[in-house]
Image (spheres, grey):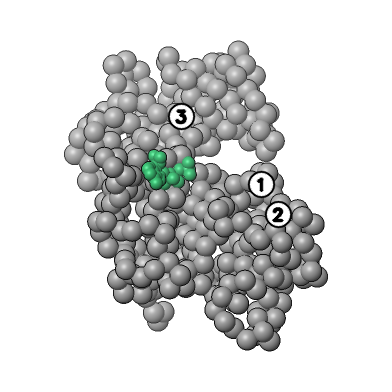
Amino acid sequence: MSTPAKTILKVSDLSRKYREDTILDSVSFSLLYGEILCLLGPSGSGKTSLLRLLAGLDNVETGSVLFENRDIRSTPAHKRQFGMMFQEYALFPHKNVEENIAFGLEMKKMESAAIDKQVTKMLKLVGLEGFGHRNMDELSGGERQRVALARSLAPQPRLLLLDEPLGSLDRTLRDRLTAEIRKILKLLGVTAIFVTHDQHEAFSIADKIGVLHNGRLEQFDRPETVYTTPANIEIARFLGFSNLIRGTVDNSGTFFQSLSGKLRFPVNRAKSSFRPETTLLIRPEGAVFRGVTPGSRIDPFQLCGIVTEKSYLGGGYRVTLLSEDNEFTFTLPLYPQPPEPGETINLTLAPSALVCIDDPAGG
Ligand SMILES: Nc1ncnc2c1ncn2[C@@H]1O[C@H](COP(=O)(O)OP(=O)(O)OP(=O)(O)O)[C@@H](O)[C@H]1O
């Protein structure tokens, strides 16, 4: 029988104000040993502020932070033994690669033989063997980020905090380094908190995602759960979903669009919901193109409409459909041949692509 995973970090009711503005509002979550948490949210949502409180770079005014069951609120940053990969802690331009990686080890007053051994290990880990004597201006952007990662991992931190570490890199390099960082952190078993406003990056690196909005932690879940069932409409919009329609669900589990009532679909709504009002999210990848002959609506999951736009995405097409005065966007695969603008088409929606988002405020 496997032993249950243990909690390494427990944050409870953490709040922070700057003058009258509430920057963090009663944030609570727990993290297990070895987990990678991604804090995701729009600009100004409080991601960096939360990371700074955890790092000890800012004082906790309200709430508690337990690390390995110990209250660390009064432990100074340098005594927490957390690694940091922040933009503001840039690499030292006058030191070479080895010297940069060795920095934290020298601060710990390690013996030079042990430092050399650890630096060699880190260079190998981040794929920079043979780069030890290079200067910073002899490295590409991606190589510099690898040095920064090696520098923050070298002292074997108890928790690694990363704030937009790949922010300055282009998309392709970001994707590659995100995968590499995850592999390295998992190999070492390091617990990490990674801040980003890039959902693509968050989904590919995280074990857990915390979505911040206006200082509140609005959802804390596995990436698949956040993507398939966003907790509210703001999160759905932040994740880029636009097929959102207001309506009500009747006792038999049928969704009716508000006002017109023209669109209706069977939905699988959470048993706990007691209000009939909801917002239906139709996930963009959940449609199958059935052809251009408009037929009678026998299939309850059928959606008929006119294609108004089509754009090529590389691995598929983005198609905009006008249906009963609603504009929907779907991603369709390359095959079968997708429809053309102007055509009236039928799509069949996967039942799991229809998600009811119950907004307590009523949307
Ligand atoms: N020292 C400070 N004094 C006053 N306001 C601050 C201070 N630091 C942050 N804020 C405010 O707190 C809010 C949250 O900032 P924070 O940097 O945590 O957001 P973020 O989610 O990390 O944003 P971004 O993605 O743009 O980095 C912002 O409105 C910001 O202006």
Q: Nearer the viewer, residue 244 or 66?
A: 66
Where is 45 relative to 127, above or below? above
Amino acid under disc 2:
Gly
Q: Earlier in the sequence, mark 3 or mark 2?
A: 2
- Which quadrant holds residue 280? top left
| Residue placed under numbered mark 3 in the picture | 242
Q: Is residue 268 left or right of residue 81?
A: left
Q: Residue at x 43, y 34 (%)?
A: 237
Q: Residues within 10 Å of mark 3 (few under 14, many from 20)?
A: some
Q: Quadrant of ligand 1?
A: top left
SS at mark 1 in the image: loop
Q: Is residue 252 left or right of residue 51?
A: left
In which quadrant of the rendered image does the N terminus lie?
A: bottom left
Q: Which mark is residue 142?
A: 2
Separation (CA) of disc 3 from disc 2: 34 Å
Amino acid under disc 1:
Leu
Callout 2 touching callout 1 (CB < 8 Å): yes
Q: Nearer the viewer, residue 105 or 129?
A: 105
Q: Residues within 10 Å of mark 1 (few under 14, many from 20)?
A: some
SS at mark 3 in the image: loop
Where is 343 relative to 23, above or below? above
| Residue placed under numbered mark 1 in the picture | 169
Separation (CA) of disc 2 from disc 1: 7 Å
Q: Nearer the viewer, residue 16 or 292?
A: 16
In which quadrant of the rendered image does the C terminus lie?
A: top left
Can residue 127 be seen from the camera position used here?
A: no
Q: Earlier in the sequence, mark 3 or mark 1?
A: 1
Where is 349 relative to 199, above or below? above
- Which quadrant holds residue 356? top left
SS at mark 2 in the image: helix
Give how far across and how far down residue 315 sits, in percent: 67, 38
